[in-house]
Amino acid sequence: MKKITIMLVFAAIGFATTAAPVGAAEQFPNRPIRIVVPYAPGGNVDISARIIAPPLAEVLGQSVVVDNRPGAGGNLGASLVAKSTPDGHTLLVGSSGPLSVNPVIFKNLPYDSLKDFAPISTVQAVPLVLLASPKSGFNSVTDVIAAAKSRPGKVTMASAGAGTTNHFAIELFAQMAGVRVLHVPYKGSGPALSELLGGQVETMVDQLAASIGYVKDGRLKVLAVTTAQRAVALPNVPTLDELGYKGFQASTLLGLLAPAGTPKPVVAKLNAAVRKVMDNNAVAERFRGLGANPGASSPEEFSTRIRDELAQWRALVKKLDLKFE
């Protein structure tokens, strides 16, 4: 009799253990969802969060609040989410900065981008573009390479800052092209674009989202796109891969993540919701208007993208022995 009772108790415990995640998903969400943006309002990451928040709330049946937590290059907000209760009610709009760049340039990060998050889905990727000032005389990537070979280390190439995806793309380009350029880091895309427009620097690698207005009105020349596929917003501009730099890939990836340990059924429910939102043509068009390539993914695909990006930049920094203060 005692043996039967004990077996029943263990059976009940086992049932409770297996049923708990399913129950969590059925009850989720049972309160407002907070999407943490690890940057100040107004940038690409913040705008993206505010595009998806209303339709996501409609799909999930709960309000979705955008919470800006800027600081330490995105590390502050990322750390906050990593340490949050893993129940799906606190999410991170993660981009390449805190996920695959900061782990390379910062020592002793308060989170591990591969272990402390449960990726949900990608939302969009912003291509980077190689731009030229109209005063530079450059009309193609071939022109830039020829100048770099005739003036080693003298052709100026601006970025939004040292240790950014833009900077890494410059270093990768120079390495693959076998040239030396002069990297000129600025504190953000705004000042760099201003100097490029004025001709103080000759070229720049920048997020298309920040420079698309200048490209479309003809004030800046776009010579190439850095993603494997052409940018949706610039279908006639070739990729560096097409121009002979095989395998060249650099972009600013963006997606939603939950804290590690979030029940898989909750992650699956959030993934399904994001997919439904991104299937909405009006939402996708808003991202395309920003120069982004919109698209959802599986959690596994998003995880692989983060891992691959991180490995790519770690290898580049190690090979070139890049130093960051």
Image (cartoon, grey):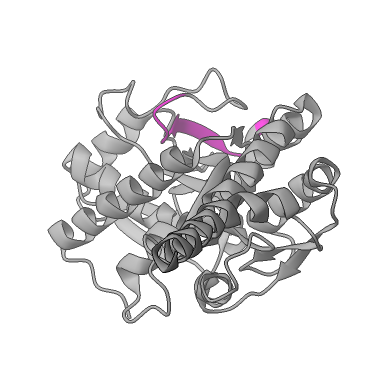
Instruction: Please determine whether, in this image, residue 220 is positioned above or below residue 163.
Output: above
Query: In the depicted view, which residue is nearer to us: 302 or 175?
Result: 302
Residue 217: say if magenta.
Answer: yes
Instruction: Please determine whether, in this image, residue 85 is positioned above or below residue 266.
Output: below
281 sits to left or right of 109: right
Answer yes or no: is residue 53 visible: yes
**How many labels were placed on the picture?**
0
Answer yes or no: is residue 160 visible: no
Which residue does the image show at 75% across and 45% down from the upper left?
A: 52
268 sits to left or right of 285: left
Residue 144: say if magenta.
Answer: no
Expressed as whole percent of the image width and height from the top left, the position of residue 7 reads 43, 60
Q: Which residues are magenta?
A: 216-229
Expressed as whole percent of the image width and height from the top left, the position of residue 156 reads 37, 54
Taking the view exactly as shown, the residue that stands out farthest to the top is 236
Which residue does the image show at 43% across and 68% down from the upper left?
A: 2
Expressed as whole percent of the image width and height from the top left, the position of residue 320 reads 16, 59
Query: In the depicted view, which residue is nearer to us: 13 or 68?
Result: 13
Q: What is the quadrant of residue 71 in the picture?
A: bottom right
- Position of the C terminus, as image quadrant, is bottom left
Taking the view exactly as shown, the residue that stands out farthest to the front is 1
- Position of the N terminus, as image quadrant, is bottom left
Expressed as whole percent of the image width and height from the top left, the position of residue 214 reads 66, 41
Query: In the depicted view, which residue is nearer to us: 48 or 120?
Result: 120
Instruction: Please determine whether, in this image, residue 297 is positioned above or below residue 118.
Output: above
Which residue does the image show at 81% across and 63% down from the upper left?
A: 31
80 sits to left or right of 246: right
Which residue does the image show at 52% across and 55% down from the upper left?
A: 95
